[in-house]
C-alpha cells in the first residue's frame, strides 16, 4: 500500500494502520446461489466466476468422469447425472436428519442422504460419504479460488452470511464449512442484516427499515433501526423451509399432472424427467415475473421404455398466482409477526428492502405494498445485496473499509467520482473519520434451562441484541446434592418438554450442603456469530464447567 | 490511543458492577425512558462494540471488552423487557384518555412525573425533538458540525414550532459557513 495512493484517494480513510491490510471476502452462501464480494477503498467488487458471472450456483457435482465440479459448470450435470449433483446443501447443514422438515426436504432432492454419526445427514455419492459442511466447503473453496485469481492475492479471512433463523448447530456447521475450505470465518452475519448494511451504510439518518428476504430456499424478515452507523436489529423471524423452490415445486406438480394426462407418462418416479419439469417450472416462473402469460413446450420428456414427447403448456400469471398465494400469504403473516415483535407499526417503516430472487414475483411486491402502504424498494439487486453487505462487514473487521461502500457503489469505480456520489446522494460523509458500521444483530431463539417441576427459566430472549451474556443464580433442590445437571433448551414454551433440547451441562464434585444453600451461577452467552456458550459455576468453591453444547445434527469433532 | 484507554476503562467499570441493576450498567437513571436506554446503548455500541477494536486491542483486552459489552447487552434486554411490560400495562389501563401528551423530557419520564417541566429552554420541545437536540449536542462536542446540523434539522422536523431550535440552527449554519 503505497503512501502516494493513500493520500490521493479523496476519502483517505483506510484502516488504522495501512501495513498488514489483508483482503477479506464477504460471502453469501445461499441455498441455490452464492455470491462473494470484497470491499475496496472505492466500492464493492464482486467475485466473478469462470465466465464472468456474479452469481454462482451452490451446486457441487461429482461426475462419473471424476473430479469435483462447482458452480455453473456443476449445474450442467443435473440432467445427465441427477444422483451426483448435490444442491440445496444449506437445507441440511447442521440439521438433525430425523426432524420432519429434513425428511420432507430429502424428498425434494435426487441424491442420496443417509444418517451419519450424531444423527447428521451424510451425502452418499458412489462410494464417497461426505458431511454437509464438506459439501458446502466445496462451494466456499470455489469462491475463494475465484477471488484469489481475480484479486491476485491469497485470501484467508471471510464473513459468511446465514439466515437470521439459523440455529446454533447450523451456524457451527457453516463455520466448519469455512474452516474446511481454508477460510477463517471472522463472523457469521444474518442475511437480512447484511442487506440492510449494504443499503444503509453511509446514509446518515435515522430510519426504520424492513428487510424482506425471500430467497431460493429460505424466507427471513427483519426490522432494523438505523441510527447513523449503528444498525440495530429490533426483531427477526423466518421460515427455514420456504423459498422460491417451493414456488417452482407447486408449478412442477401441475406440469407433472399435465404430463401424465396428455402424454400418458407419469414423470414422478423418474428423477431426470422431474428435474426437467422443475427447470421448466423455474423458467415459467421467471417469465411470468415479466409477462402476463407464458406459453411454450417442454421437450425431451422421454421416460425409459416409452416413446418421448413434448409437453405444451399455457399458463397465465393469474393462474400461477393462484398456485402460490398460500406461500406468499405465509410470508406476509410472518412479516406482521415481526413488526409486532419489534413494536413497530407498518406505516412507520420508511423503507422495505426486497432481497432474494423470489421477490421478483409481482404478487410478492403487491402484497408488500398493501401491507406497508408504500412501494417496496426494489432498486437493490436482490441476489447480490447480501454479499455486498457481507463484504462491507468483512472490510470493516479487517479495516479496509472506506466511506461510501454502500448501495451506489456496487462496482469498484473511479475514486473521486465515488465520494462525489456520496455528497450528491444527500449523504453527509465526514471526511476525516473512519466510518465503520456497528452491527447489532439479534439472538435467533429464546434460550432457557430446566428448573424443578419441568418448567423453564428463560435466560436469553429471542431478539435480544448479541453478543450478550446473562447469568442467573440457582440452587439445589435436594439435601447433600453433589451433582447438578443443567438442561438447556431452545423455544418459547414454559414447559421444558415442549421445547427443543440443546444439551445438558453437568457440574460435579459440589460440596454436600443442605438444599438451597449452594449458589450455582449459570450464564448463557451468545457470541456475535449467534453461537451459544453455557457456563456454570459454584460460587463458593469456584468449580466451573464450561460447555460448548453438542447439538444433535451438528458435525462432531471427529469429523474435523 | 485514548479510544483504547476509554474503552478499557469502561469495560472495567462495567465488569466491576456485576450484578448491579440494568440501568447502572447502561449508565442511565433508573427512571430513564425506553428511548433514552436505546440511545445510551447505541452510544455504548459506537464506543465499545468489540468489532471496532479487533485490530487495536490485544486478545485478552478484547475478551474483556467483549464480556463487558455482552453484559451490558444483557442489561439492555432486561431494561427493555421491563419497560415494554410497563408500557403494555399502562396502555391496557389508560387506553381511555386520548390526546394526552407524553412527558416532555427524554431522559426522565415514566416514573418521575415531577421532573417533566424542565426549566431549560431545550426542555420545552417535545420528546422527539429533545432526543435529536441531545444528539446534536453530542455531535458538537465531538466537533462534528455536519452531524450536528443533520440532528438539529431532524429535531426541527420533530418540533417545527420551536424558536429555540431555529435559533440554534441559524447559529450552527453561520458557524459552518465561516469554516
Image: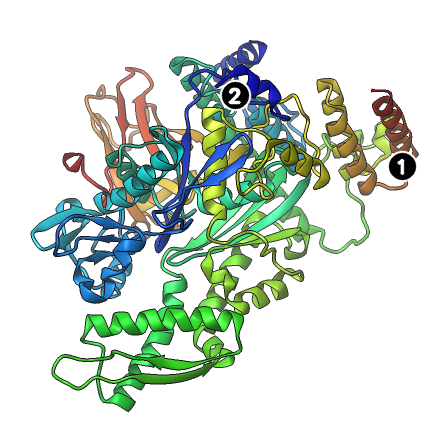
- Residue at 72% x, 51% y is B94
Q: Are marks 1 and 2 on the same chain?
A: no
Count of numbered labels shown in the rendering = 2
Of badges 1 and 2, the one in the foreground is 2
Q: Please provide percent x and percent y for residue B53.
A: 49, 20
The residue wearing badge 1 is B162
Q: State the residue in front, A2 or B46.
A: A2
The circle drawn on residue A15 is 2
SS assignment at label 1: loop
Q: Please provide percent x and percent y for residue A354.
A: 54, 55
- Residue at 77% x, 24% y is B145
Mark 2 chain:
A
The C terminus of chain A lies in quadrant: top left
The circle drawn on residue B58 is none
SS assignment at label 2: loop
Vertical position of residue A258 compared to residue A381: above or below: below
Q: Residues within 10 Å of mark 2 (few under 14, many from 20)?
A: many
Q: Are marks 1 and 2 in contact (CB under 8 Å)?
A: no
For residue B111, side relative to residue A358 (left or right): right
Q: Residues within 10 Å of mark 1 (few under 14, many from 20)?
A: some
Give the farthest residue toward the left. Answer: A127
Q: Please provide percent x and percent y for residue A361.
A: 50, 67
Amino acid at each position: 500500500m503505497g503512501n502516494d495512493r493513500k493520500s490521493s484517494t479523496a476519502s483517505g480513510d483506510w484502516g488504522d494502520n495501512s501495513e498488514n491490510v489483508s483482503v477479506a471476502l464477504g460471502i453469501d452462501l445461499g441455498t441455490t446461489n452464492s455470491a462473494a464480494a470484497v470491499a475496496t477503498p472505492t466500492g464493492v467488487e464482486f467475485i466473478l466466476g469462470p465466465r464472468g458471472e456474479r452469481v454462482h450456483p451452490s451446486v457441487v457435482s461429482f461426475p462419473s468422469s471424476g473430479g469435483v465440479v462447482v458452480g455453473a459448470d456443476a449445474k450442467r450435470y443435473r440432467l445427465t447425472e441427477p444422483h451426483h449433483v448435490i444442491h440445496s446443501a444449506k437445507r441440511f447443514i447442521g440439521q438433525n436428519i430425523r426432524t420432519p422438515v429434513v425428511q420432507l426436504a430429502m424428498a425434494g432432492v435426487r441424491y442420496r442422504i443417509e444418517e451419519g454419526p450424531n444423527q447428521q445427514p451424510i451425502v452418499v455419492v458412489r462410494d464417497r460419504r461426505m458431511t454437509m459442511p464438506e459439501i458446502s466447503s466445496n462451494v466456499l473453496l470455489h469462491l475463494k479460488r475465484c477471488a484469489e485469481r481475480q484479486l491476485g492475492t491469497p485470501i484467508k479471512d471471510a464473513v459468511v452470511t446465514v439466515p437470521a433463523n439459523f440455529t446454533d448447530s447450523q451456524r457451527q456447521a457453516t463455520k466448519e464449512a469455512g474452516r474446511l475450505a481454508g477460510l477463517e470465518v471472522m463472523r457469521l452475519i444474518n442475511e437480512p442484516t447484511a442487506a440492510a448494511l449494504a443499503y444503509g451504510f453511509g446514509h446518515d439518518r435515522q430510519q426504520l427499515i424492513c428487510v424482506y428476504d425471500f430467497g431460493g430456499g429460505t424466507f427471513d424478515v427483519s426490522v432494523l433501526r438505523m441510527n447513523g452507523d449503528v444498525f440495530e436489529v429490533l426483531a427477526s423471524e423466518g421460515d427455514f423451509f420456504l423459498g422460491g423452490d417451493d414456488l417452482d415445486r407447486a408449478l412442477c406438480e401441475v406440469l407433472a399432472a399435465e404430463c401424465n394426462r396428455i402424454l400418458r407418462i407419469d414423470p414422478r418416479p423418474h428423477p431426470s424427467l422431474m428435474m426437467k419439469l422443475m427447470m421448466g417450472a423455474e423458467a415459467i416462473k421467471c417469465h411470468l415475473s415479466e409477462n402476463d402469460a407464458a406459453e411454450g413446450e417442454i421437450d425431451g420428456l422421454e421416460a425409459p421404455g416409452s416413446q418421448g414427447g413434448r409437453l405444451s403448456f399455457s399458463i397465465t400469471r393469474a393462474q400461477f398466482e393462484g398456485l402460490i398465494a398460500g406461500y406468499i400469504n405465509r410470508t406476509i403473516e410472518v412479516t406482521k409477526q415481526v413488526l409486532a415483535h419489534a413494536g413497530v407499526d407498518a406505516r412507520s417503516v420508511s423503507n422495505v428492502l426486497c432481497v432474494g430472487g423470489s421477490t421478483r414475483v409481482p404478487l410478492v411486491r403487491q402484497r408488500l405494498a398493501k401491507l406497508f402502504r408504500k412501494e417496496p424498494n426494489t432498486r437493490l439487486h436482490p441476489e447480490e445485496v447480501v454479499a455486498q453487505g457481507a463484504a462491507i462487514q468483512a472490510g470493516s473487521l479487517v479495516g479496509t473499509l472506506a466511506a461510501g461502500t454502500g448501495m451506489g457503489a456496487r462496482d469498484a469505480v473511479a475514486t473521486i467520482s465515488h465520494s462525489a456520489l456520496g455528497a450528491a446522494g444527500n449523504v453527509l460523509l465526514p471526511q476525516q473519520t473512519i466510518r465503520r458500521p456497528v452491527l447489532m444483530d439479534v439472538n435467533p431463539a429464546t434460550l432457557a434451562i430446566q428448573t424443578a417441576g419441568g418448567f423453564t427459566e428463560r435466560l436469553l430472549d429471542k431478539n435480544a441484541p448479541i453478543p450478550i451474556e446473562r447469568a442467573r443464580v440457582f440452587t439445589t433442590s435436594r439435601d447433600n446434592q453433589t451433582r447438578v445437571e443443567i438442561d438447556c433448551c431452545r423455544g418459547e414454551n414454559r414447559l421444558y418438554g415442549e421445547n427443543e433440547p440443546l444439551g445438558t451441562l453437568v457440574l460435579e464434585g459440589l460440596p454436600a450442603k443442605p438444599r438451597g444453600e449452594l449458589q450455582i451461577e449459570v450464564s448463557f452467552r451468545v457470541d456475535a456469530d449467534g453461537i451459544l456458550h453455557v457456563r456454570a459455576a459454584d460460587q463458593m468453591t469456584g468449580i466451573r464447567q464450561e460447555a460448548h453444547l453438542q447439538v444433535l445434527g451438528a458435525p462432531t469433532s471427529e469429523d474435523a | 490511543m485514548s479510544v483504547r484507554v476509554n474503552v478499557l476503562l469502561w469495560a472495567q467499570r462495567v465488569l466491576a458492577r456485576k450484578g448491579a441493576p440494568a440501568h447502572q450498567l447502561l449508565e442511565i437513571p433508573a427512571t430513564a425512558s425506553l428511548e433514552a436506554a436505546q440511545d445510551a446503548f447505541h452510544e455504548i455500541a459506537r464506543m465499545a462494540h468489540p468489532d471496532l477494536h479487533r485490530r487495536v486491542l490485544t486478545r485478552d483486552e478484547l475478551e474483556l471488552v467483549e464480556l463487558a459489552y455482552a453484559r451490558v447487552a444483557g442489561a439492555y434486554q432486561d431494561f427493555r423487557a421491563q419497560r415494554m411490560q410497563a408500557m403494555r400495562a399502562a396502555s391496557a389501563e389508560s387506553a381511555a384518555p386520548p390526546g394526552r401528551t407524553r412527558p416532555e423530557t427524554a431522559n426522565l419520564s415514566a416514573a418521575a412525573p415531577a421532573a417533566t417541566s424542565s426549566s431549560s429552554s431545550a426542555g420545552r420541545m417535545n420528546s422527539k425533538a429533545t432526543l435529536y437536540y441531545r444528539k446534536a449536542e453530542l455531535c458538537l462536542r465531538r466537533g462534528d458540525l455536519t452531524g450536528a446540523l443533520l440532528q438539529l434539522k431532524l429535531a426541527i422536523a420533530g418540533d417545527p414550532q420551536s424558536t429555540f431550535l431555529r435559533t440554534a440552527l441559524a447559529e450552527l449554519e453561520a458557524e459552518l459557513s465561516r469554516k
